[in-house]
Amino acid sequence: MDFTVLRDLAAGNTWGSIWPELGLGCLALALLVLETVLPKSAHRRIPMVSILGQLGLLVALLATFDTSRHEAFNGLLMQSPLGELMRAFFLVSSLLVSILGRAGLPGRKVPQVEFHHIVLVVAAAMMLLVESRNFVMLFVALETVTVGLYILVSYYRSSAKTLEAGLKYLVMGALSSALLLFGIVLLYGVAGSAGLAGRTPQGMYFVGLEAFLEVNPHNFMAAAGIVLVLAGVAFKIGAFPFQIWVPDVYQGAPTPVTAFLAVASKAAGFIVLLVLVTQVFAPYEWLVVPVLTFMAAATILFGNLAALKQNNVKRLIGLSGVSHAGFILLAVASANRVPSAIGAVYFYLIAYLVASFAVFGVMTILSGPDDAEQELSDYCGLAKRSPFLAGILACGLGSLAGIPPLAGFMGKLFVFTAAFRAGHYGLLAVAISGVVISIYYYFGWIRAAYFNDEAPISPETASRVDGGGMTLRVAIALLAAGSIILGFYQGPLGSLLSR
Amino acid sequence: MSSLPLDPLLLSVGAPLSVAALIALGVPKRIVVKLAYLGFAVPAIAGLYLWWSFAAAAKESHGYAYLTNYSTGLDGFGISLKLGLNGISLPLFVLAGIVGFAAGLYALQSTAERMKTYLLLLLVMLAGLIGTFASVDIFFFYFFHELALIPTFIMVGIWGGRDRSHAAMTLTVYLTIGAMLSLLGLVAIYVKSGANSFDLLAIRDTLASRPLGEVTQRHIFGLLLFGFGVLVSLWPFHSWAPLGYGAAPSSAAMLHAGVLKKFGLYGLVQIALPLLPLGALHWSHTAATLAAVGNVLVIGLVTIAQRDLKQMVGYSSVMHMGYAFLGIATGSLLGVGGVVMLMVAHGLSVALLFLLSTSIHQRTNTFDLQQMGGLAQQAPVLAALFVTATFASVGLPGFANFWGELPIFVALWGFSHCLTVIALLGTVISAVYGLRAAARVFFGPQTEAFARFEASKPVTDITWAERLPALVLIAALLFVGVWPRSISTGIDQALAGRVPAAAAVPVATPQ
């Protein structure tokens, strides 16, 4: 037996390079162990262990921020500065979801520790997902994320709305995975077919497939595979015409999970899409760019128009999230021709994270016994009852609406500039009208909080403003401050992204 | 700027912002008032100092003095906080300082609810206004404008008069459309110029050697004309203005109508005309016709028909914006210079009118002109101030407005005789509604409604706390009216060779 081959392969398994993922996995297991060994009275402290552990990992990650580019696991994974940035992104998301969960879960009859466990596992899988440079790796990571989210979405299992959401997400998720898998198989099959020039057994690797596609830039089967892969990813990011699950699932899922879906899951989808579009499918620009352009325009219009008439804030934020997906697609569609579009996608996602979690934090605090029923009318007169929460909400929504000096505006500016450079003038016109429409419903929400103080509010609803606990309040205050600061001082992040 | 320990431009932006931040952090109320005085005064004092020393200051580049540059981490995108002033931005910077000071004084003596938040928003707005005119970087020029715009929406929504919710929403949607279009135009300049920088001076340098093609110029100028046009209430995109001003609290209306609205005109004069001269020539007749027929004639007649004093002032400001667009359309040194002059003059006079309207409302409890009458007996000083403000607004010689309108009319004669006649008709219209309002409010017999109101609450004359901001504004109007050279020299220098009429010569001459 030839041991050198195995030794060489093992030498490529640079386990040290995925220490943040391993750390998250160990932390997740530790939570379960703690639940079995600790007495029942100490169980309520376990979520805090998870939060502190993630905080520790985040500090370690930022302290050892690796700005080099190298392969790991023989090309299955790619480490890069932007990959490091996304690791921090997912770590921050899971940390915030844990904080939201710690505030929102107690009081409902559901298992507590398992929630935090699954969040950590999903976050680790998302990190691997955006680093993967191999379709098998990509699919395994993606399925880990999706299966974890199936559980999380239907976590409040006694609520009919939540179960409906869970079922819809399961069916739609399975369908999208099937499409993605079918696309991958087609591409792999075409790349390996004997009759074609440049055929390669390395069709599962992004590099190998790209080399093959470059030689065959107009192969029908490959084009069909690409469209299927794009469709699979479009499900994850909630882009038109695969956005139909978004409002129901966002409404039914527990609010912390809605935040996780809206921010982290969508971001993971976009980074995968960005890698696919700019690298693997670059030779098929003639196909990919028109498809993305159409999707972007339709997504922006659908998201904004459908959000106009919503009174349930979870549906509203879900549909507004669809429109944000459209704006980011605008940048992805420009990324082939304009390098700065890549930085724009990252910045937009970061701004979206900071703003969304602030809003979700306020929603978690204000949610009643039925998590799915959060209406705009519950926010009437919020500014009088709690100026703090109203201020946070205004910062978050303002940033989502893209109002300067908040971070969301910078995100939109970068995206629009990139799209302008790429010559997507028609799409820009759609995007601008989308922004104007979106002002209407974001402003309607702010108007409820600030200007409508005559509407009657039940004492029970009014008393919710004091909930949430200190950790969550500090977290959302930091997020609101982050939205403001990122709006006019981007500092090291700006230089990293504009390189 | 090494002679000063602190950059006065950054200080003018930073002082109101810092005070606003301190208020947000919750300092006690008695300190809030003192801090607010400081926050409102610093930009005015800095503005006057800079105006005084401008002639002697070193012009480092393109006639800009006091240039400083601060990095915000986006140098890779060509964005950095570059501050500086030239002959066009300086008078507007001083205008923002003076109107901001007057609006601040007026707010401090008012009895608004949630006073702390009110002052905080006004200070943020002031910082945005100051920053707009101090920015050389066109990204920050836009950014600071939005910073000033957001508090306006909130102030209309919270402290507005009747129908405030509707007014706030209309204002927000309209102005967002305008802002988005102008943003697109600015991004277009950034991308198409190839300078890879938002720095106006870098863009000027690049375009001086490689001007944009005529078709590109037309498209971009169109975007900017209508984007800024919505913001400056160019007819037929004006309907937000009277509605918004009618509902806005007085200090917010003073700052918005007086200063913030000049952003669009300033953008056209400082950015669009010099960079896109061919685009400006292409659009000049459209803009001039819309402005003359729409803003001056139609809105002028609409203004005469107003019964509500505050709405009337709002409409009159829409009408005067028509003259500004006419001046820009002429594209000549005289006309465009007149526009800058008019921007300063109108800013001062419309702020004064909004201030006095609110003071009248406090004494009559109504804005309805037909419910008022004979207020001059109880409030002679208020009457004198209001008549003065009306004279200024009509453009009587001796006030700054005269020096704004006269050059525009002279330049317009060379552009189009027909439009000049319409514009001159406008001065008659504005005299009609201005003097009629003054007569209705202060002279003639008292109406029954007013007599009843007076019986329930005795009417007093304007207080010193209200007089002071009004006097500051009148002093500025008279100063510029008597000595227009104090700002026109700088304007001439900044505009020389940078107006479309100058650029048109090589195009009109066959090779």
Image: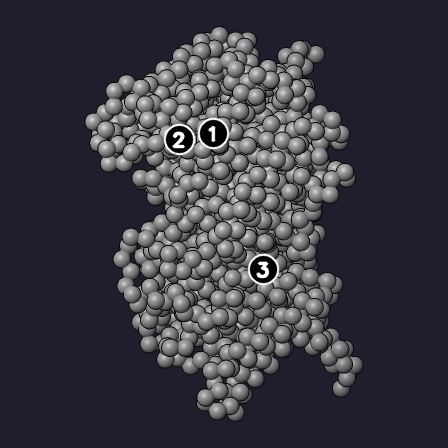
Q: Nearer the viewer, mark 1 or mark 2?
A: 2
A449 horizontally vs B90: left or right: left
| Residue nearest the viewer, comparing B353 with B414 | B353
Identified by mark 2, the residue type is: Ile
| Residue nearest the viewer, comparing A7 with B235 | B235
User: Which numbered disc flags the more N-terminal residue, 1 or 2?
Assistant: 2
Marks 3 and 1, Cα distance to the nearest angstrom?
Answer: 58 Å
Is residue B307 visible from the viewing direction of this image?
A: no
Quick check: marks 3 and 1 in contact, CB under 8 Å?
no
Marks 2 and 3, Cα distance to the nearest angstrom?
Answer: 64 Å
Is residue B53 visible from the viewing direction of this image?
A: yes
Q: Which color mode does the image show?
A: one colour
Which quadrant of the figure contains the N terminus of chain A? bottom right
Quick check: marks 1 and 2 in contact, CB under 8 Å?
yes
Residue B245 percent location from the top left of the image: 39, 34
| Residue nearest the viewer, comparing A135 with B431 | B431
B126 horizontally vs A111: left or right: right
Same-subunit check for callouts 1 and 2? yes
Q: Which residue is mark 3?
A: A271
Q: Chain of mark 3?
A: A
Identified by mark 1, the residue type is: Ala
Marks 1 and 2, Cα distance to the nearest angstrom?
Answer: 10 Å
Identified by mark 3, the residue type is: Ile
Q: Nearer the viewer, mark 3 or mark 1?
A: 1
Q: Which residue is mark 1?
A: B470
**Position above or below: A167 against A338:** below
Q: Which residue is mark 2?
A: B462
